[in-house]
Image (cartoon, rainbow, N blue to C red):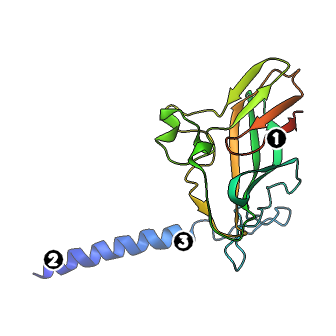
Amino acid sequence: MNVRYARRGLASLAVASVALLAVGCGSDEKPKADKPAAVTTAPSKTQEGQEQPSANESTEELAVLKGQKGLELTVNSVERDAGGFITVKGRLRNAAETVSAIPPQTSGDETEVVKHGTSLGGASLVDSVGKKRYYVLRDTDGRPLTTIGLNSLGPGKSTAVFMQFPAPPASTTEVSFQLPTFEPATLKLS
């Protein structure tokens, strides 16, 4: 019986030693003065629960698309990256005085995309000069590379959104951005 208590005591001592060792690691290190403090990039919420733009989120308005029932999509950035993609970022906002459901048409009509829930998977970029349409990219499971899980927005509420597309050729400097149930907008590419 005493052996069992001794083993428990040794096990407790071992756990406590590991915990102290983990806490003690790096305790002699002092923070470097030239290192900036960490910046929170997650959107913060106001008292009403509305997301505010994060530190990395642009507030410049490149285009504002009007949708159904008071929904508006503000495009804040269009970034072409070296990997051959274009990422469109913005905010989806409910300007109405009542709750607005996100129309299911915004997900598009592709079975693989629709099965993952309401999204902005129906968005596309149209290159009228090159006569091509670029759809939101999908991962290997068919999930769209865009904001998903959109259901509804309360009055005056907004949420950050993104969509990723294959990039048109570098010579294409302008595309028409289209999202079902929203009016189209012209976006400049750099």
Cα gap from disc 2 to disc 3, whole angstroms: 29 Å
Few, some or many residues within 10 Å of mark 1 (<14, 14–19, 20+) = some
Quadrant where the image shows the C terminus: top right
Q: Secondary structure at mark 1?
A: strand
Pinpoint residue 7: horizontal percent, then vertical percent.
21, 74
User: Which residue type carries mark 2?
Assistant: Arg
User: Which residue matches tag 3?
Assistant: 23
Pinpoint residue 101: horizontal percent, then vertical percent.
59, 59
Work out whether residue 42 or residue 72 is closer to the camera in this orientation and state it: 72
Q: Residue at x 50, y 40 (%)?
A: 114
Residue 50 in which image quadrant: bottom right
Front tag of 3 and 1 = 1
Pinpoint residue 57: horizontal percent, then vertical percent.
79, 55
Mark 1 or mark 2, earlier in chain = 2
In this rendering, position of residue 82 left or right of residue 9: right
Task: Name the disc covering residue 103, or none.
Answer: none
User: Which residue matches tag 1?
Assistant: 78
User: Which residue matches tag 2?
Assistant: 4
Q: Secondary structure at mark 3?
A: helix
Mark 2 or mark 3, earlier in chain = 2
Pinpoint residue 11: horizontal percent, then vertical percent.
29, 72
Residue 163 in which image quadrant: top right
Instruction: Check whether the beta carbons of the residues at disc 1 and disc 2 lie within 8 A of each other.
Output: no
User: Which residue type carries mark 1?
Assistant: Val
User: Which residue type carries mark 3?
Assistant: Val
In this rendering, position of residue 188 left or right of residue 137: right
> Compared to 65, does 101 lie above or below?
below
Q: Residue at x 59, y 61 (%)?
A: 152
